[in-house]
Amino acid sequence: MFVLVEMVDTVRIPPWNFDRQLNEAMAEELNKKLANKVVYNVGLCICLYDITKLEDSYIFPGDGASHTKVHFRYVVFHPFLDEILTGKIKYCSQEGVHVTMGFFDDILIPPESLQQPAKFDEAEQVWVWEYETDEGGHDLYMDQGEEIRFRVADQVFVDTSPTGPAVAASDAEGKKEAPYTLIVRIIQTN
């Protein structure tokens, strides 16, 4: 679920932070820049683990800040395919069951991955598993706030980098996509 990722970046330390220890100032700037952000094809950055190497610092003309190339390891949320996770149902819609883990909300269980036979109840806005037994059928509702176990089936990264004005105008009517989404299969509800 969480992995350590080795990264390299050039960090700018403003002059008012020169009185602090270099590692402490670097850690603060790296966490400001990366914590709670999605890095394309890497995952959701959580926090700095450690700094492995600091290269030489430079001060450029016209800028009083120091610029240092830093090698570091960062804790990243990036579950493995087929990993089983636990979350809570955030809400249900026609496109599936949306699940949250508290710190990460972009988890979707599409209708074809739900326990079958399943149907969407428009009136209550919930998915219903039509469970058959020897005594007849039972409707098991997937209510908001219920704990749920699920298996990671796919990870979708969307490049949300800024685009030019012509592309941005055509995308204006479309809905905003999450930069990182997990597509999962349901395992069990408790």
Image: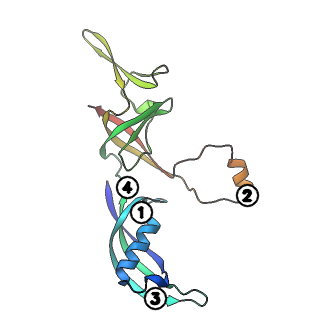
Q: Residue at x 38, y 31 (%)?
A: 144
Q: Can residue 53 be seen in this view?
A: no
Q: What element carries label 1?
A: loop
Figure quadrant of the C terminus:
top left
Question: Mark 2 or mark 1: which comes first in sequence?
Answer: 1
Q: What residue is disc 4 on? A: 78
- Amino acid bearing label 1: Ala
The quadrant where residue 129 appears: top left
Q: Which of the two marks, 1 or 4, is nearer to us in this view?
A: 1
Q: Is mark 4 on a helix, strand or loop?
A: loop
Q: How far apart are labels 2 and 1 at the CA level?
A: 29 Å
The quadrant where residue 32 appears: bottom left
Decide if residue 76 is on the left or right side of residue 134.
right
Q: Is mark 3 on a helix, strand or loop?
A: strand
Q: What residue is disc 2 on? A: 165
Mark 3, residues whose alpha carbon is within 10 Å: few (<14), some, or many (≥20)?
Answer: some
Q: Which residue is drawn at 33% across and 78% down?
A: 52
- Amino acid bearing label 2: Pro
Q: Which x, y percent locates residue 122?
A: 49, 21
Q: Which of the two marks, 2 or 1, is nearer to us in this view?
A: 1
- Amino acid bearing label 3: Ser
Seen in the picture, residue 163 relative to 59 is either above or below; the reply is above
Look at the numbered discs 1 and 4 and tell me whether their residues touch, using CB distance below 8 Å: no
